[in-house]
Amino acid sequence: MNPLLRQGSALLMVVGLTGCAPPDPPVLPAPAAPLGVVAPAREQASNDDDIANRPIEDAPAAPPAAEAAVADDAVPSVVSVALDHAGDVVIGQRFTELAADGPWHSAGLSEGEPAGACEYYERGNLPEGVSMMVEDDHVQRFELAPIEDSYEAITQPGPFGLRLGMTRDEAMQRLPPGSTRAPHAYDPQTGEYLTWQDPGSDLAIRLEIFDGVISKLYWGASGAVELIEGCA
């Protein structure tokens, strides 16, 4: 072979082998520090450090819940009443049987009067705000009326859920059918009596209404309910 051709072929083989060489490996970034690496321990504080001398403070107490404050408020109790009773006291019951349930507070109407004279009592085992009329040692009627305190403090309802301050229309919606109306003895222009008699017993309820609003409410024996002045 011609020497020139031999040298050319050798040069081409070297160039070809050089083009087939593998590329250089890529340069990867340094790996990040693992999450579990523990920070170097903090140097222990000495007695001269501010942290060592700092007092330990307790966590502030949580404020009381609003529900607890509401639960602590005094809520007036409502006691069962009906035409024949108020709480544990029953129409027709002897007061001598109830005397031990005192203390009772009387209006003093029977002072200087013979035994069995009409008297009003409250407290004892009556619901708060309810008084009772006793005559001849028998309970005759109940009334939503304290002897001395203000009527505005009464929260106890009467029979049928009637309350002082209700309107006549509200009372008519609660009373059974058959109520009767009559002018008030002292002020027939603005006042009236609204009375319901139980057809199955000798019990009744009467409301005194002025300007369309209940101002008095009493119930019990029919004859006692019809008394204008309670004892008279």
Image (cartoon, rainbow, N blue to C red):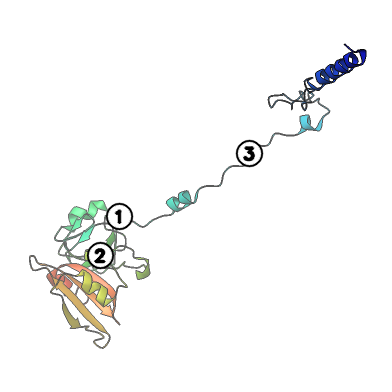
Residue 171 placement: quadrant: bottom left
Picture disc at residue 103: 1
Residue 50 vs residue 102: left or right? right
Residue sitting at x 22%, y 72%: 173
Q: CA distance from mark 1 to mark 3?
A: 51 Å
State the count of labels: 3
Q: Position of residue 167 (x, y in %)?
A: 29, 76
The front one of 56 and 122 is 56
- Disc 3: which residue: 59
Check the image and report above or below for 88 versus 232.
above
The quarter of the image holding the C terminus is: bottom left
Residue 100 x/y as whole percent? 24, 51
Q: Are marks 2 and 1 in contact (CB under 8 Å)?
A: no
Q: Amino acid at mark 3?
A: Ala
Q: Based on the displayed image, in which of its 4 quarters is residue 199 positioned?
A: bottom left
Q: Earlier in the sequence, mark 1 or mark 3?
A: 3
Q: Nearer the viewer, residue 13 or 95?
A: 13
Residue with the most extreme top position: 1
Q: Nearer the viewer, mark 2 or mark 1?
A: 2
> From where the camera sits, is residue 227 visible?
no
Residue 136, percent from left and from top: 14, 64
Quadrant (top left/top right/bottom left/bottom right) for the N terminus:
top right
Q: As shown in the figure, which amino acid type bears the numbered disc 1? A: Pro
Q: Nearer the N terminus, badge 2 or badge 1?
A: 1
Type of amino acid at the residue the image marks with label 2: Gly
Spatial CA distance of label 3 from label 2 is 51 Å
Q: Which mark is residue 161?
A: 2
Q: Is residue 44 left or right of residue 182?
A: right
